[in-house]
Amino acid sequence: MASSSSSAPLESADTVATRTAHVQSLLDRLLQNSPIYGFTLSEIKLESVSRGFVTTALTLTETHVNSKGSLHGAVSATIIDFTTGLAIASWDLRPSTGASVDMHISYLSTAKAGDTIRIETTAERVGGSLAFVSIKILKGDDIVTIGQHSKFVRGTAPVVPLKN
């Protein structure tokens, strides 16, 4: 999984602000318009945005855990579905982020109610038809979940892409 690359060109403050505002707007719209996102992820917070990379955080509650008190696998999948769209939107400010093609999830550790998780989501490639995104859900330095999500994105590109 890639992380924010130190070899990536630095963006201007205006570009960062525009990119962040766009992703925050999408986050807010998704929470408002999707009952499952609104119920499950209403407290998710945007931490940072750069081209193709979004970091969010969520403090887990009883809503997020299974009968054993651990982060529920379905909640992890919902987080992946939600945040991968944000990373795709951060790539070029597209207004919508396509439809899921496939999702692969590995559960490596756990988190419980009261824990704050950090979600690092990277759009590895956003092409004309498909986007490939990877994700890490972390509790501190401990990797809880990793995933990959492919989405069909044809027709979602912005009319005028953001220039650096």
Image: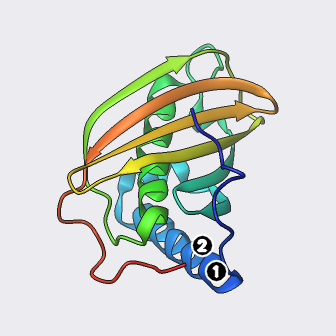
- Classed neighbour count for the residue bearing mark 2: other residues with Cα under 10 Å, few (<14), some (14–19), many (≥20): many
Q: Nearer the viewer, residue 154 or 37?
A: 154
Picture quarter with the N terminus:
top right
Location of residue 37 with respect to 1 vertically, above or below? below
- Classed neighbour count for the residue bearing mark 1: other residues with Cα under 10 Å, few (<14), some (14–19), many (≥20): some
Task: Kindly indicate the quadrant of the structure image that contains residue 35.
Answer: bottom left
Q: Which residue is under mark 2?
A: 20
Q: Residue 73: x, y in percent? A: 49, 23
Q: Nearer the viewer, residue 27 or 90?
A: 90
**Looking at the image, which residue is at 69% across and 25% down?**
143
Q: Do the residues labelled 2 and 1 touch (CB within 8 Å)?
A: yes
| CA distance separating discs 2 and 1 | 5 Å
Q: Which residue is under mark 1?
A: 17
Residue 25's disc number? none
* Three-letter code for the amino acid on which mark 2 is drawn: Thr
Q: Is mark 2 on a helix, strand or loop?
A: helix
Q: Nearer the viewer, residue 67 or 106?
A: 106
Q: Residue 86: x, y in percent? A: 47, 58
Q: Residue 98: x, y in percent? A: 26, 55
Location of residue 18 with respect to 93 vertically, above or below? below
* Three-letter code for the amino acid on which mark 1 is drawn: Ala
**Looking at the image, which residue is at 49% across and 34% down?**
75
Location of residue 118 with respect to 50 vertically, above or below? above
